[in-house]
Image: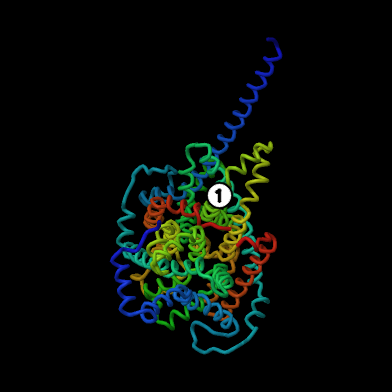
Amino acid sequence: MGGNTDTTVGRLRSGVSWSRLRRYCYDGITYLVYALAIGFFLFPVLWVLSLSLRTEGAVYTSLELIPAEPSLDSYREVLDSGILRWLWNTLFVTVLTVAGIIVVTTPAAYAFSRFEFRGRRSLLLAVLGFQMISPIVIVLPLYDIMRTLGLTESHAGLVLLYIGLQIPFSLWLLKGYFDTIPTELDKAARIDGCNRLQTLRYVLLRPVMPGIAVVAIFNFVLTWSEFVMAYTMLSPGGEDLYTLSMGIYVFDNQLATQWTNVAAAAVVGIVPIIAFFVALQRYFVRGLTEGAVKG
Amino acid sequence: MTTEPPAAERSLWARLRRTVGDGTVADFVDRGVSHPLFWLLPALLFIGVFQLYPMVEVFRMSLTDTSLISSQESYVWLENYRRLLGSERFYSTLRVTAIYSVGSIVLQLGLGLGLALAIDYGVRRGLRGPLLTRVVVLSAWVVPGIIIGLVWRIMLLETDVGVVNNALGRLGFEVVPFLSDAGMAVVSVIAAGAWRGTAFSMIMFYAGLKRVPEDLYRAAKVDGAGPVARFRYVTLPQLKPVVFVVTILVTIYSLNSFDLIFALTNGGPGRATEVIALAMYKSAFESYQMGMAAATAVVLLVVTLTVTAVYFRVFDISEEI
Protein backbone atom coordinates (compact mmCIF):
# COMPACT_ATOMS: atom_id res chain seq x y z
CA MET A 1 0.00 0.00 0.00
CA GLY A 2 0.99 3.59 0.10
CA GLY A 3 2.04 6.47 -2.09
CA ASN A 4 4.46 4.47 -4.15
CA THR A 5 1.89 2.41 -6.03
CA ASP A 6 -0.40 5.40 -6.28
CA THR A 7 2.14 7.54 -8.04
CA THR A 8 2.96 4.69 -10.40
CA VAL A 9 -0.69 4.31 -11.27
CA GLY A 10 -1.01 8.03 -11.49
CA ARG A 11 1.94 8.27 -13.80
CA LEU A 12 0.61 5.44 -15.91
CA ARG A 13 -2.79 7.01 -16.11
CA SER A 14 -1.48 10.41 -17.00
CA GLY A 15 0.78 8.74 -19.59
CA VAL A 16 -2.21 7.08 -21.19
CA SER A 17 -4.30 10.20 -21.28
CA TRP A 18 -1.35 12.18 -22.56
CA SER A 19 -0.94 9.94 -25.59
CA ARG A 20 -4.68 9.91 -26.04
CA LEU A 21 -4.71 13.67 -25.92
CA ARG A 22 -2.01 13.81 -28.54
CA ARG A 23 -3.98 11.44 -30.71
CA TYR A 24 -7.11 13.58 -30.42
CA CYS A 25 -4.99 16.53 -31.38
CA TYR A 26 -3.76 14.77 -34.54
CA ASP A 27 -7.30 13.69 -35.34
CA GLY A 28 -8.47 17.27 -34.97
CA ILE A 29 -5.77 18.57 -37.29
CA THR A 30 -6.64 15.86 -39.81
CA TYR A 31 -10.31 16.80 -39.77
CA LEU A 32 -9.35 20.42 -40.24
CA VAL A 33 -7.25 19.47 -43.27
CA TYR A 34 -10.20 17.53 -44.68
CA ALA A 35 -12.55 20.47 -44.20
CA LEU A 36 -10.17 22.99 -45.78
CA ALA A 37 -9.44 20.70 -48.71
CA ILE A 38 -13.10 19.97 -49.39
CA GLY A 39 -13.91 23.67 -49.17
CA PHE A 40 -11.13 24.74 -51.51
CA PHE A 41 -11.60 22.03 -54.11
CA LEU A 42 -15.38 21.90 -54.10
CA PHE A 43 -16.19 25.59 -54.00
CA PRO A 44 -15.40 26.57 -57.63
CA VAL A 45 -17.58 23.75 -58.93
CA LEU A 46 -20.45 24.65 -56.61
CA TRP A 47 -20.08 28.31 -57.47
CA VAL A 48 -20.25 27.80 -61.23
CA LEU A 49 -23.26 25.56 -60.66
CA SER A 50 -24.87 28.31 -58.63
CA LEU A 51 -24.16 30.91 -61.31
CA SER A 52 -25.62 28.71 -64.00
CA LEU A 53 -28.92 28.48 -62.14
CA ARG A 54 -29.42 32.23 -61.79
CA THR A 55 -31.16 34.82 -63.85
CA GLU A 56 -28.81 37.16 -65.68
CA GLY A 57 -29.42 40.00 -63.21
CA ALA A 58 -28.74 37.94 -60.09
CA VAL A 59 -25.06 37.36 -60.76
CA TYR A 60 -24.06 40.80 -59.55
CA THR A 61 -25.78 40.86 -56.22
CA SER A 62 -26.03 37.79 -54.10
CA LEU A 63 -23.41 35.48 -52.71
CA GLU A 64 -25.75 32.65 -51.73
CA LEU A 65 -24.87 29.31 -53.22
CA ILE A 66 -28.52 28.48 -53.71
CA PRO A 67 -30.02 31.25 -55.81
CA ALA A 68 -33.22 32.89 -54.53
CA GLU A 69 -34.93 32.58 -57.88
CA PRO A 70 -33.44 29.56 -59.62
CA SER A 71 -33.84 29.55 -63.37
CA LEU A 72 -33.00 27.13 -66.13
CA ASP A 73 -32.98 29.80 -68.84
CA SER A 74 -29.23 29.62 -69.33
CA TYR A 75 -29.38 25.88 -69.90
CA ARG A 76 -32.11 26.37 -72.46
CA GLU A 77 -29.92 28.83 -74.38
CA VAL A 78 -26.79 26.74 -74.07
CA LEU A 79 -28.48 23.57 -75.25
CA ASP A 80 -29.62 25.46 -78.33
CA SER A 81 -26.05 26.44 -79.12
CA GLY A 82 -24.94 23.02 -80.27
CA ILE A 83 -23.35 21.88 -77.04
CA LEU A 84 -25.01 18.47 -77.28
CA ARG A 85 -23.25 17.98 -80.57
CA TRP A 86 -19.91 18.80 -78.90
CA LEU A 87 -20.72 16.47 -76.05
CA TRP A 88 -21.34 13.67 -78.51
CA ASN A 89 -18.15 14.45 -80.46
CA THR A 90 -16.11 14.37 -77.27
CA LEU A 91 -17.62 11.09 -76.15
CA PHE A 92 -17.02 9.55 -79.57
CA VAL A 93 -13.40 10.65 -79.77
CA THR A 94 -12.71 9.68 -76.16
CA VAL A 95 -14.17 6.17 -76.32
CA LEU A 96 -12.37 5.35 -79.56
CA THR A 97 -9.09 6.72 -78.22
CA VAL A 98 -9.28 4.70 -75.02
CA ALA A 99 -10.14 1.52 -76.91
CA GLY A 100 -7.30 2.12 -79.36
CA ILE A 101 -4.77 2.76 -76.61
CA ILE A 102 -5.66 -0.45 -74.80
CA VAL A 103 -5.49 -2.53 -77.97
CA VAL A 104 -2.10 -1.12 -78.93
CA THR A 105 -0.52 -0.82 -75.49
CA THR A 106 -1.41 -4.13 -73.84
CA PRO A 107 0.63 -6.33 -76.20
CA ALA A 108 3.56 -3.90 -76.08
CA ALA A 109 3.51 -3.80 -72.28
CA TYR A 110 3.37 -7.59 -72.26
CA ALA A 111 6.40 -7.75 -74.53
CA PHE A 112 8.42 -5.35 -72.40
CA SER A 113 7.56 -7.32 -69.31
CA ARG A 114 7.93 -10.90 -70.60
CA PHE A 115 10.39 -10.99 -73.49
CA GLU A 116 14.14 -10.97 -73.21
CA PHE A 117 15.60 -9.35 -76.28
CA ARG A 118 18.59 -7.29 -77.13
CA GLY A 119 18.03 -3.57 -76.59
CA ARG A 120 14.89 -4.12 -74.50
CA ARG A 121 16.01 -1.79 -71.75
CA SER A 122 17.17 0.97 -74.09
CA LEU A 123 13.99 0.71 -76.16
CA LEU A 124 11.89 0.99 -73.02
CA LEU A 125 13.88 3.99 -71.85
CA ALA A 126 13.51 5.57 -75.30
CA VAL A 127 9.75 5.11 -75.17
CA LEU A 128 9.69 6.55 -71.66
CA GLY A 129 11.82 9.42 -72.92
CA PHE A 130 8.90 10.54 -75.04
CA GLN A 131 6.96 10.93 -71.82
CA MET A 132 9.33 13.80 -71.02
CA ILE A 133 8.19 15.57 -74.15
CA SER A 134 5.01 17.51 -73.83
CA PRO A 135 2.70 17.34 -76.85
CA ILE A 136 2.73 21.14 -77.00
CA VAL A 137 6.38 21.01 -78.11
CA ILE A 138 5.53 19.08 -81.24
CA VAL A 139 2.15 20.60 -82.03
CA LEU A 140 3.53 22.51 -85.05
CA PRO A 141 5.04 19.56 -86.95
CA LEU A 142 2.03 17.48 -85.93
CA TYR A 143 -0.20 20.03 -87.60
CA ASP A 144 1.87 19.69 -90.77
CA ILE A 145 1.83 15.90 -90.64
CA MET A 146 -1.90 15.77 -90.05
CA ARG A 147 -2.46 18.16 -92.94
CA THR A 148 -0.26 16.10 -95.23
CA LEU A 149 -2.08 12.90 -94.25
CA GLY A 150 -5.44 14.63 -94.69
CA LEU A 151 -6.29 13.98 -91.04
CA THR A 152 -7.10 17.51 -89.91
CA GLU A 153 -10.76 18.42 -89.52
CA SER A 154 -11.54 14.79 -88.79
CA HIS A 155 -12.40 12.95 -85.60
CA ALA A 156 -10.74 9.76 -86.81
CA GLY A 157 -7.53 11.71 -87.36
CA LEU A 158 -7.74 13.19 -83.87
CA VAL A 159 -8.23 9.71 -82.40
CA LEU A 160 -5.11 8.40 -84.14
CA LEU A 161 -3.17 11.41 -82.92
CA TYR A 162 -4.31 10.94 -79.32
CA ILE A 163 -3.39 7.26 -79.40
CA GLY A 164 0.06 8.14 -80.67
CA LEU A 165 0.58 10.81 -78.01
CA GLN A 166 -0.71 8.88 -75.04
CA ILE A 167 1.00 5.54 -75.61
CA PRO A 168 4.24 6.13 -73.65
CA PHE A 169 2.65 6.84 -70.26
CA SER A 170 0.08 4.07 -70.64
CA LEU A 171 2.81 1.66 -71.67
CA TRP A 172 4.83 2.55 -68.60
CA LEU A 173 1.85 2.08 -66.28
CA LEU A 174 0.84 -1.21 -67.81
CA LYS A 175 4.34 -2.62 -68.01
CA GLY A 176 4.72 -1.96 -64.30
CA TYR A 177 1.50 -3.83 -63.77
CA PHE A 178 2.57 -6.85 -65.79
CA ASP A 179 5.78 -6.91 -63.74
CA THR A 180 3.80 -7.51 -60.55
CA ILE A 181 2.28 -10.70 -61.94
CA PRO A 182 4.44 -13.75 -61.18
CA THR A 183 5.97 -15.40 -64.25
CA GLU A 184 5.00 -18.79 -62.79
CA LEU A 185 1.60 -18.15 -64.37
CA ASP A 186 3.20 -17.92 -67.80
CA LYS A 187 5.20 -21.08 -67.25
CA ALA A 188 2.14 -23.03 -66.16
CA ALA A 189 0.25 -21.83 -69.22
CA ARG A 190 3.14 -22.81 -71.43
CA ILE A 191 3.15 -26.30 -69.98
CA ASP A 192 -0.59 -26.49 -70.63
CA GLY A 193 0.14 -25.83 -74.29
CA CYS A 194 -0.73 -22.15 -74.60
CA ASN A 195 1.26 -20.07 -77.02
CA ARG A 196 1.99 -16.48 -75.99
CA LEU A 197 -1.18 -15.09 -77.52
CA GLN A 198 -3.28 -17.59 -75.59
CA THR A 199 -1.26 -16.98 -72.45
CA LEU A 200 -2.06 -13.30 -72.61
CA ARG A 201 -5.69 -13.84 -73.53
CA TYR A 202 -6.59 -16.64 -71.10
CA VAL A 203 -4.11 -16.36 -68.27
CA LEU A 204 -2.68 -12.86 -67.86
CA LEU A 205 -5.56 -10.68 -68.97
CA ARG A 206 -7.57 -11.24 -65.81
CA PRO A 207 -4.84 -10.39 -63.28
CA VAL A 208 -3.76 -7.39 -65.36
CA MET A 209 -7.32 -6.04 -65.59
CA PRO A 210 -6.93 -3.54 -62.71
CA GLY A 211 -3.97 -2.05 -64.58
CA ILE A 212 -5.96 -1.83 -67.80
CA ALA A 213 -8.73 -0.14 -65.83
CA VAL A 214 -6.28 2.50 -64.60
CA VAL A 215 -5.01 3.10 -68.12
CA ALA A 216 -8.57 3.33 -69.46
CA ILE A 217 -9.79 5.74 -66.77
CA PHE A 218 -6.67 7.88 -66.96
CA ASN A 219 -6.84 8.20 -70.74
CA PHE A 220 -10.57 8.78 -70.67
CA VAL A 221 -10.09 11.79 -68.41
CA LEU A 222 -7.08 13.03 -70.37
CA THR A 223 -8.77 12.75 -73.74
CA TRP A 224 -12.04 14.24 -72.55
CA SER A 225 -10.19 17.33 -71.31
CA GLU A 226 -7.69 17.73 -74.11
CA PHE A 227 -7.70 21.12 -75.76
CA VAL A 228 -4.62 22.15 -77.74
CA MET A 229 -4.62 19.34 -80.27
CA ALA A 230 -8.37 19.46 -80.82
CA TYR A 231 -8.28 23.24 -81.14
CA THR A 232 -5.40 23.12 -83.61
CA MET A 233 -6.59 20.24 -85.75
CA LEU A 234 -10.35 20.80 -85.76
CA SER A 235 -10.65 24.60 -85.72
CA PRO A 236 -10.93 25.12 -89.46
CA GLY A 237 -13.57 22.40 -89.70
CA GLY A 238 -16.53 24.35 -88.37
CA GLU A 239 -18.54 24.17 -85.18
CA ASP A 240 -20.08 20.78 -85.87
CA LEU A 241 -16.69 19.13 -85.36
CA TYR A 242 -15.82 20.82 -82.07
CA THR A 243 -15.10 18.93 -78.89
CA LEU A 244 -16.49 20.22 -75.59
CA SER A 245 -13.33 21.99 -74.45
CA MET A 246 -12.86 23.93 -77.66
CA GLY A 247 -16.58 24.52 -78.11
CA ILE A 248 -16.85 26.03 -74.65
CA TYR A 249 -13.74 28.13 -75.23
CA VAL A 250 -15.08 29.56 -78.49
CA PHE A 251 -18.54 29.98 -76.97
CA ASP A 252 -17.04 31.87 -74.03
CA ASN A 253 -15.21 34.21 -76.38
CA GLN A 254 -18.40 34.94 -78.29
CA LEU A 255 -20.56 35.52 -75.23
CA ALA A 256 -18.08 37.69 -73.33
CA THR A 257 -20.15 38.72 -70.32
CA GLN A 258 -23.26 36.56 -70.32
CA TRP A 259 -21.99 34.84 -67.21
CA THR A 260 -24.95 32.58 -66.56
CA ASN A 261 -24.69 31.08 -70.04
CA VAL A 262 -20.95 30.63 -69.80
CA ALA A 263 -21.44 29.00 -66.40
CA ALA A 264 -24.10 26.67 -67.75
CA ALA A 265 -21.80 25.63 -70.58
CA ALA A 266 -19.04 24.98 -68.06
CA VAL A 267 -21.39 22.83 -65.97
CA VAL A 268 -22.32 20.78 -69.02
CA GLY A 269 -18.60 20.28 -69.59
CA ILE A 270 -17.82 19.41 -65.97
CA VAL A 271 -20.67 17.22 -64.75
CA PRO A 272 -20.36 14.22 -67.08
CA ILE A 273 -16.64 13.76 -66.53
CA ILE A 274 -16.89 14.20 -62.76
CA ALA A 275 -19.78 11.73 -62.63
CA PHE A 276 -17.76 9.28 -64.69
CA PHE A 277 -14.75 9.66 -62.47
CA VAL A 278 -16.54 9.56 -59.14
CA ALA A 279 -18.23 6.35 -60.23
CA LEU A 280 -14.94 4.74 -61.22
CA GLN A 281 -12.33 6.38 -58.97
CA ARG A 282 -12.36 3.33 -56.71
CA TYR A 283 -10.88 1.21 -59.50
CA PHE A 284 -8.48 3.97 -60.43
CA VAL A 285 -7.07 4.35 -56.93
CA ARG A 286 -7.06 0.61 -56.29
CA GLY A 287 -5.23 -0.08 -59.52
CA LEU A 288 -2.70 2.63 -58.76
CA THR A 289 -2.04 1.53 -55.21
CA GLU A 290 -1.80 -2.14 -56.07
CA GLY A 291 0.75 -2.17 -58.75
CA ALA A 292 1.05 0.42 -61.40
CA VAL A 293 3.11 2.96 -59.50
CA LYS A 294 6.59 1.63 -59.42
CA GLY A 295 9.48 3.87 -58.62
CA MET B 1 -3.57 -24.78 -61.84
CA THR B 2 -4.24 -21.99 -64.27
CA THR B 3 -7.10 -21.34 -66.62
CA GLU B 4 -6.88 -23.45 -69.72
CA PRO B 5 -7.91 -22.46 -73.20
CA PRO B 6 -11.34 -23.88 -74.00
CA ALA B 7 -11.27 -27.53 -74.98
CA ALA B 8 -12.67 -26.86 -78.45
CA GLU B 9 -9.89 -24.48 -79.28
CA ARG B 10 -7.23 -26.81 -77.98
CA SER B 11 -8.50 -29.71 -80.04
CA LEU B 12 -8.75 -27.47 -83.10
CA TRP B 13 -5.20 -26.43 -82.50
CA ALA B 14 -4.15 -30.03 -82.06
CA ARG B 15 -5.93 -31.04 -85.28
CA LEU B 16 -4.28 -28.21 -87.16
CA ARG B 17 -0.93 -29.35 -85.93
CA ARG B 18 -1.66 -32.92 -86.94
CA THR B 19 -2.89 -32.10 -90.46
CA VAL B 20 -0.41 -29.38 -91.33
CA GLY B 21 2.46 -30.93 -89.49
CA ASP B 22 5.12 -29.03 -87.69
CA GLY B 23 7.06 -26.49 -89.65
CA THR B 24 4.29 -24.77 -91.60
CA VAL B 25 1.28 -22.68 -90.57
CA ALA B 26 1.16 -23.51 -86.89
CA ASP B 27 4.86 -23.19 -86.60
CA PHE B 28 4.79 -19.92 -88.48
CA VAL B 29 2.17 -18.48 -86.14
CA ASP B 30 4.04 -19.78 -83.14
CA ARG B 31 7.26 -18.30 -84.28
CA GLY B 32 5.68 -14.97 -85.21
CA VAL B 33 3.94 -14.79 -81.87
CA SER B 34 7.12 -15.54 -80.00
CA HIS B 35 8.97 -12.68 -81.64
CA PRO B 36 8.79 -9.44 -79.63
CA LEU B 37 8.37 -7.31 -82.74
CA PHE B 38 4.93 -8.82 -83.33
CA TRP B 39 3.82 -7.35 -80.00
CA LEU B 40 5.65 -4.08 -80.20
CA LEU B 41 5.07 -3.08 -83.80
CA PRO B 42 1.75 -1.21 -83.49
CA ALA B 43 2.91 0.82 -80.50
CA LEU B 44 6.25 1.59 -82.13
CA LEU B 45 4.54 2.64 -85.36
CA PHE B 46 2.30 5.07 -83.51
CA ILE B 47 5.20 6.49 -81.56
CA GLY B 48 7.26 6.78 -84.72
CA VAL B 49 4.63 8.71 -86.66
CA PHE B 50 3.24 10.90 -83.90
CA GLN B 51 6.27 11.44 -81.66
CA LEU B 52 9.62 10.52 -83.14
CA TYR B 53 9.13 12.05 -86.58
CA PRO B 54 7.59 15.28 -85.28
CA MET B 55 10.48 15.56 -82.83
CA VAL B 56 12.98 15.48 -85.65
CA GLU B 57 10.77 17.73 -87.72
CA VAL B 58 10.48 20.45 -85.07
CA PHE B 59 14.27 20.74 -85.03
CA ARG B 60 14.35 20.99 -88.81
CA MET B 61 11.54 23.56 -88.88
CA SER B 62 13.37 25.68 -86.35
CA LEU B 63 16.16 26.13 -88.89
CA THR B 64 13.81 27.41 -91.61
CA ASP B 65 11.66 30.43 -92.23
CA THR B 66 8.59 28.29 -92.84
CA SER B 67 5.31 30.10 -92.36
CA LEU B 68 1.67 29.15 -92.10
CA ILE B 69 0.64 31.52 -94.86
CA SER B 70 3.23 30.86 -97.55
CA SER B 71 4.42 27.61 -99.03
CA GLN B 72 7.91 28.99 -99.62
CA GLU B 73 10.50 27.65 -97.27
CA SER B 74 14.23 28.14 -97.07
CA TYR B 75 16.87 27.37 -94.51
CA VAL B 76 17.93 30.28 -92.35
CA TRP B 77 19.90 28.00 -90.01
CA LEU B 78 20.39 29.64 -86.63
CA GLU B 79 18.74 32.95 -87.53
CA ASN B 80 15.55 32.08 -85.58
CA TYR B 81 17.54 31.30 -82.46
CA ARG B 82 19.57 34.48 -82.85
CA ARG B 83 16.39 36.55 -83.06
CA LEU B 84 14.86 34.66 -80.15
CA LEU B 85 17.84 35.18 -77.87
CA GLY B 86 17.94 38.84 -78.84
CA SER B 87 14.32 39.56 -77.97
CA GLU B 88 13.05 41.04 -74.74
CA ARG B 89 9.89 38.95 -74.96
CA PHE B 90 11.80 35.69 -74.87
CA TYR B 91 13.45 36.47 -71.55
CA SER B 92 10.17 37.63 -70.11
CA THR B 93 8.52 34.30 -71.04
CA LEU B 94 11.46 32.38 -69.60
CA ARG B 95 11.16 34.27 -66.33
CA VAL B 96 7.38 33.82 -66.16
CA THR B 97 7.71 30.10 -66.90
CA ALA B 98 10.34 29.71 -64.18
CA ILE B 99 8.27 31.53 -61.56
CA TYR B 100 5.10 29.73 -62.51
CA SER B 101 6.83 26.33 -62.47
CA VAL B 102 8.62 26.77 -59.17
CA GLY B 103 5.43 28.07 -57.54
CA SER B 104 3.39 25.22 -58.98
CA ILE B 105 5.87 22.51 -58.03
CA VAL B 106 6.28 23.70 -54.45
CA LEU B 107 2.56 24.22 -53.94
CA GLN B 108 1.39 21.04 -55.63
CA LEU B 109 3.97 18.74 -54.07
CA GLY B 110 3.50 20.32 -50.65
CA LEU B 111 -0.30 20.26 -50.69
CA GLY B 112 -0.29 16.83 -52.33
CA LEU B 113 1.97 15.34 -49.68
CA GLY B 114 0.02 16.98 -46.85
CA LEU B 115 -3.28 15.68 -48.17
CA ALA B 116 -1.88 12.22 -48.84
CA LEU B 117 -0.57 12.02 -45.25
CA ALA B 118 -3.89 13.25 -43.86
CA ILE B 119 -5.83 10.72 -45.91
CA ASP B 120 -3.47 7.86 -45.11
CA TYR B 121 -3.61 8.75 -41.41
CA GLY B 122 -7.41 8.92 -41.52
CA VAL B 123 -7.67 5.54 -43.20
CA ARG B 124 -5.31 3.90 -40.70
CA ARG B 125 -7.19 5.44 -37.77
CA GLY B 126 -10.60 4.71 -39.23
CA LEU B 127 -11.65 8.36 -39.21
CA ARG B 128 -14.59 9.58 -41.23
CA GLY B 129 -13.82 11.78 -44.23
CA PRO B 130 -10.73 10.50 -46.06
CA LEU B 131 -12.76 8.98 -48.88
CA LEU B 132 -14.86 12.11 -49.40
CA THR B 133 -11.75 14.29 -49.34
CA ARG B 134 -9.99 12.08 -51.85
CA VAL B 135 -12.97 12.06 -54.21
CA VAL B 136 -13.44 15.84 -54.03
CA VAL B 137 -9.77 16.61 -54.68
CA LEU B 138 -9.62 14.13 -57.54
CA SER B 139 -12.77 15.64 -59.04
CA ALA B 140 -10.96 18.94 -59.45
CA TRP B 141 -8.26 17.13 -61.37
CA VAL B 142 -10.65 15.73 -63.99
CA VAL B 143 -12.23 19.07 -64.88
CA PRO B 144 -10.92 20.10 -68.32
CA GLY B 145 -8.15 22.71 -68.02
CA ILE B 146 -9.88 25.13 -70.35
CA ILE B 147 -12.99 25.08 -68.15
CA ILE B 148 -10.92 25.53 -64.99
CA GLY B 149 -9.38 28.63 -66.52
CA LEU B 150 -12.81 29.94 -67.41
CA VAL B 151 -14.34 29.21 -64.00
CA TRP B 152 -11.45 30.82 -62.14
CA ARG B 153 -11.64 33.87 -64.42
CA ILE B 154 -15.28 34.33 -63.45
CA MET B 155 -14.49 33.85 -59.76
CA LEU B 156 -11.63 36.33 -59.83
CA LEU B 157 -13.39 39.05 -61.82
CA GLU B 158 -12.84 42.50 -60.40
CA THR B 159 -16.52 43.42 -60.49
CA ASP B 160 -19.26 42.20 -58.16
CA VAL B 161 -19.67 39.10 -60.32
CA GLY B 162 -16.29 37.91 -59.07
CA VAL B 163 -17.20 36.04 -55.93
CA VAL B 164 -13.81 36.43 -54.28
CA ASN B 165 -13.73 40.19 -54.64
CA ASN B 166 -17.41 40.42 -53.78
CA ALA B 167 -16.80 38.55 -50.54
CA LEU B 168 -13.67 40.55 -49.74
CA GLY B 169 -15.65 43.74 -50.40
CA ARG B 170 -18.29 42.73 -47.89
CA LEU B 171 -15.56 42.16 -45.33
CA GLY B 172 -14.39 45.69 -45.97
CA PHE B 173 -11.38 45.04 -48.19
CA GLU B 174 -10.48 46.91 -51.33
CA VAL B 175 -10.86 45.25 -54.73
CA VAL B 176 -7.90 42.95 -55.37
CA PRO B 177 -6.69 43.11 -58.99
CA PHE B 178 -6.36 39.34 -59.33
CA LEU B 179 -6.13 39.41 -63.11
CA SER B 180 -5.20 42.97 -64.04
CA ASP B 181 -2.11 43.37 -61.87
CA ALA B 182 0.98 41.69 -63.29
CA GLY B 183 2.15 40.17 -60.02
CA MET B 184 -1.29 39.12 -58.81
CA ALA B 185 -2.07 37.53 -62.17
CA VAL B 186 0.90 35.20 -61.78
CA VAL B 187 -0.29 34.27 -58.29
CA SER B 188 -3.80 33.63 -59.63
CA VAL B 189 -2.51 31.40 -62.39
CA ILE B 190 -0.39 29.41 -59.93
CA ALA B 191 -3.37 29.03 -57.57
CA ALA B 192 -5.65 27.81 -60.33
CA GLY B 193 -2.92 25.44 -61.46
CA ALA B 194 -2.61 24.06 -57.95
CA TRP B 195 -6.36 23.62 -57.74
CA ARG B 196 -6.11 21.33 -60.71
CA GLY B 197 -2.73 19.68 -60.20
CA THR B 198 -2.61 18.91 -56.48
CA ALA B 199 -4.76 15.82 -56.93
CA PHE B 200 -2.13 14.18 -59.10
CA SER B 201 0.62 14.56 -56.48
CA MET B 202 -1.81 13.55 -53.75
CA ILE B 203 -2.88 10.31 -55.36
CA MET B 204 0.65 9.30 -56.33
CA PHE B 205 1.94 10.02 -52.82
CA TYR B 206 -1.01 8.18 -51.34
CA ALA B 207 -0.25 5.16 -53.51
CA GLY B 208 3.34 5.37 -52.28
CA LEU B 209 2.31 5.64 -48.62
CA LYS B 210 0.09 2.59 -48.86
CA ARG B 211 3.08 0.56 -49.94
CA VAL B 212 5.19 1.39 -46.90
CA PRO B 213 5.24 -1.89 -44.96
CA GLU B 214 3.45 -1.59 -41.59
CA ASP B 215 6.33 -3.56 -40.01
CA LEU B 216 8.74 -0.69 -40.58
CA TYR B 217 6.54 1.63 -38.53
CA ARG B 218 6.16 -0.94 -35.81
CA ALA B 219 9.90 -1.55 -35.68
CA ALA B 220 10.58 2.18 -35.53
CA LYS B 221 8.03 2.52 -32.74
CA VAL B 222 9.72 -0.25 -30.76
CA ASP B 223 12.99 1.59 -31.20
CA GLY B 224 11.33 4.59 -29.60
CA ALA B 225 10.86 6.78 -32.65
CA GLY B 226 8.17 9.46 -32.30
CA PRO B 227 5.83 10.46 -35.11
CA VAL B 228 8.23 13.06 -36.51
CA ALA B 229 11.18 10.66 -36.45
CA ARG B 230 9.05 7.95 -38.05
CA PHE B 231 8.12 10.34 -40.84
CA ARG B 232 11.69 11.45 -41.31
CA TYR B 233 13.38 8.04 -41.16
CA VAL B 234 10.72 5.63 -42.38
CA THR B 235 8.15 7.40 -44.54
CA LEU B 236 10.37 9.77 -46.49
CA PRO B 237 13.05 7.26 -47.55
CA GLN B 238 10.34 4.79 -48.56
CA LEU B 239 8.61 7.50 -50.58
CA LYS B 240 11.76 8.60 -52.37
CA PRO B 241 11.12 6.82 -55.68
CA VAL B 242 7.57 8.18 -55.82
CA VAL B 243 8.74 11.68 -54.94
CA PHE B 244 11.21 11.43 -57.79
CA VAL B 245 8.59 10.40 -60.36
CA VAL B 246 6.03 12.95 -59.15
CA THR B 247 8.57 15.77 -59.11
CA ILE B 248 9.61 15.02 -62.68
CA LEU B 249 6.07 14.72 -63.99
CA VAL B 250 4.77 17.83 -62.21
CA THR B 251 7.79 19.76 -63.47
CA ILE B 252 7.17 18.67 -67.04
CA TYR B 253 3.48 19.57 -66.80
CA SER B 254 4.23 22.96 -65.26
CA LEU B 255 6.95 23.92 -67.72
CA ASN B 256 4.65 23.03 -70.60
CA SER B 257 1.43 24.50 -69.20
CA PHE B 258 -0.88 25.88 -71.79
CA ASP B 259 -4.63 25.40 -71.73
CA LEU B 260 -5.45 26.69 -68.25
CA ILE B 261 -3.41 29.87 -68.76
CA PHE B 262 -4.76 30.26 -72.28
CA ALA B 263 -8.29 30.43 -70.87
CA LEU B 264 -7.56 32.24 -67.59
CA THR B 265 -5.38 35.17 -68.67
CA ASN B 266 -4.28 34.40 -72.23
CA GLY B 267 -0.87 35.58 -71.14
CA GLY B 268 -2.01 38.96 -69.83
CA PRO B 269 -2.02 41.53 -68.48
CA GLY B 270 0.55 42.52 -71.06
CA ARG B 271 2.88 39.55 -71.08
CA ALA B 272 2.82 39.03 -67.32
CA THR B 273 1.62 35.41 -67.52
CA GLU B 274 2.88 34.51 -70.97
CA VAL B 275 4.68 31.19 -70.51
CA ILE B 276 6.92 29.70 -73.21
CA ALA B 277 4.25 27.36 -74.57
CA LEU B 278 1.80 30.23 -74.94
CA ALA B 279 4.35 32.45 -76.70
CA MET B 280 5.16 29.60 -79.05
CA TYR B 281 1.53 28.96 -79.90
CA LYS B 282 0.90 32.63 -80.53
CA SER B 283 3.87 33.11 -82.81
CA ALA B 284 2.76 30.09 -84.82
CA PHE B 285 -0.96 30.68 -85.11
CA GLU B 286 -1.25 34.44 -84.61
CA SER B 287 1.91 35.72 -86.30
CA TYR B 288 2.18 32.66 -88.59
CA GLN B 289 5.94 32.42 -87.99
CA MET B 290 6.27 28.67 -87.80
CA GLY B 291 10.06 28.75 -87.93
CA MET B 292 10.32 31.09 -84.95
CA ALA B 293 7.68 29.12 -83.10
CA ALA B 294 9.55 25.87 -83.74
CA ALA B 295 12.72 27.44 -82.34
CA THR B 296 10.75 28.43 -79.23
CA ALA B 297 9.46 24.87 -78.95
CA VAL B 298 13.00 23.53 -79.17
CA VAL B 299 14.07 25.86 -76.37
CA LEU B 300 11.14 24.63 -74.27
CA LEU B 301 12.22 21.06 -74.94
CA VAL B 302 15.82 21.79 -74.02
CA VAL B 303 14.73 23.50 -70.80
CA THR B 304 12.55 20.51 -69.88
CA LEU B 305 15.27 17.97 -70.59
CA THR B 306 17.90 19.96 -68.73
CA VAL B 307 15.76 20.22 -65.62
CA THR B 308 14.96 16.49 -65.82
CA ALA B 309 18.66 15.66 -66.13
CA VAL B 310 19.38 17.75 -63.05
CA TYR B 311 16.74 15.81 -61.13
CA PHE B 312 18.35 12.52 -62.12
CA ARG B 313 21.62 13.83 -60.75
CA VAL B 314 20.13 15.15 -57.53
CA PHE B 315 18.02 12.11 -56.73
CA ASP B 316 20.69 9.61 -57.77
CA ILE B 317 18.10 6.98 -58.54
CA SER B 318 19.31 5.30 -61.73
CA GLU B 319 19.26 1.80 -60.25
CA GLU B 320 15.64 1.95 -59.18
CA ILE B 321 13.92 2.27 -62.55
Q: Secondary structure at mark 1?
A: loop
How far across and down, in percent of the image, does residue B315 sit? 67, 59
* Residue A88 vs residue A264, the one in the foreground: A88
Q: Which residue is mark 1?
A: B211
Q: Amino acid at mark 1?
A: Arg
How far across and down, in percent of the image, does residue A150 sit? 40, 81
Q: Is A159 on the left or on the right of B116, as rendered?
A: left
Label 1 crowd (10 A; few <14 / some 14-19 / many >=20): some
Q: Quadrant of residue B280?
A: bottom right
Q: Residue at x 65, y 42 (%)?
A: B230
Q: Residue at x 68, y 36 (%)?
A: B224
| Image quadrant in which the C terminus of chain A is located | bottom right
How far across and down, in percent of the image, does residue A132 sit? 57, 68
* Residue A281 vs residue B159, the one in the foreground: A281
How far across and down, in percent of the image, does residue B146 sit? 46, 61
Q: Against B204, is A131 above or below?
A: below
Q: Quadrant of residue B299?
A: bottom right
Q: Is residue B204 visible?
A: yes
